[in-house]
Amino acid sequence: MNRRIVFILVALAVIIPMLLPVSLPVSVSEPTQQLYDYITALPAGSTIMLAFDYGPASLAELNPMARAVLRQCFDRDVRVIGFTLAADGTTLASTIMREVAEEKGAVDGEDYVFLGFRPGGTQVMLGMGNSISSVFETDYSGNTTTEIPMMKEITSYDEIALLIDLASGSTTELWIIYTNVRYDLQIAAGVTGVIISQMYPYLQTGQLVGLIPGILGAAQYERLIDVPAKGMLWINIESFVHLLIVLLVVIGNIIFFNQRRREE
Amino acid sequence: MELFGIWVAALLTLCIYSFLYQDNPFYRFAEHLFVGISVGYGIVLSIHQGLVPFALKPLWAALTGESLSGLVKLIPIGVGLLFFARLSPQHVWLIRYPIAILIGFGAGIAIPNVLRANIFEQTRGTIEPFAAMHAGTLSGFGVLEAILMVAGVVCTLTYFFFSVEHRGPVKWLSKVGIAFLMIGFGSAFGNTVMGRVALLIQRVDFLLGDWLNLIS
């Protein structure tokens, strides 16, 4: 079969359900529920960190998660410190935080702060364990970190209830290795489909308190906060594409075994 | 301006997807543009968010007498500059010093933490359910899960144990290990497909929604 026929079929499986939306049920998996419950149980006024460790190439899966988590935090008066270790994720992260904050009426500097980007990866993780303001002297807008109202009481990981790493690479493992082990910081993750399988061992041991797995996890989170958005829309379309792929795999195998039998 | 951005993004998206038909100059233009902009953006941001606040600003403050503590920064700056010794064949040996410091720091900080996170904690996680089983607090499904997990770990490790010939029971254990590995790879592949399809859906959503306004 010409591979271009497969491309056309996949394109149709995406375009048709997008133009004629169908709502399929989404059941919530345990790892997603665990993260939702953890944030729900935090007292009002707690502070979490949200690491936007991804760039535009992975926004399809991670942006819906970021928005859903931020909505839950702002609804529950949980303060959020955002930052990124990915240079190309800076503008993206800043925009998401600002948009969700505007939607929820959260105030910059009081309910949330976006610290921006710092190069160095591991050094940034370790440095914030001693002093956040020594790594981020100013926030993304240029305000001195120690003078930002919500940052006056926050100096290091000691005042952070949870760090959620939205990752498209290996940063979640680094956060676990360097901050969970060394500083006992509670970690949760929202990751792209490619790395979901690598995260389950950490979830089983409790090194991750929760996990949002790919676009499916984003849809589940949107269901939990009861704000259907892109995640729930896209997971419905995913279902059609997955059905098509299963069908193509079955057809491919039938053709393969028929050809082999004929050759024998 | 926003409309202009949408048009540029839409046309570049189509350029990239044109590769599905065959390789062509439009695809290569979009690919080179993406790589160039990403690298350029990354370098500029690293200079502004790393080099300037951590090296140049403190050094300038020291030079102007504002805060002499900035002079300490001369040490890491000097060590960092030694990387450029690579450009001179006569002084190339100097690069060993920054590399030695980086490896020494990296290994020193990584080894204890990696051992604890990836070896000790994972071993604990594999064994711990048996303590719960012994205490009678594990459900029937939990017992099955714990046994399956230990069987998976033992069989998979046996497959990668090359000090004995894979014959008899060792052969069968390693064959079961292969089955566990295949299940793991299958799960990873399935999740990867989900991720890749999500990227396509997001782009089609952008083209049909933001660009063509066919969906709200």
Image (cartoon, coloured by chain):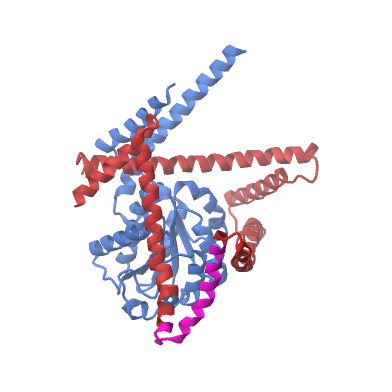
Tell me, by letter, which chain the rendering colours red: B
Q: What residue is drawn where x is 31% and y is 66%?
A: A74
Q: Is residue A36 visible?
A: no
Image coordinates of residue B48 in percent, x first then y, are 38, 67
Q: Is residue A80 visible?
A: yes
Residue range of the region highlighted in magenta in the rendering? B62-85
Q: Colour of chain A?
A: blue
Magenta: predominant secondary structure element? helix
Query: In the rendered view, does B138 fall on the left or right side of A145?
Result: right
Compared to A72, does B205 lie above or below? above
Q: What residue is drawn where x is 77% and y is 39%?
A: B166
Compared to B114, does B170 lie above or below? above
Determine if the magenta segment contains residue B93: no
Q: Nearer the viewer, residue A28 or B12?
A: B12
Image coordinates of residue A234 in percent, x first then y, are 33, 43
Determine if the magenta segment contains residue B78: yes
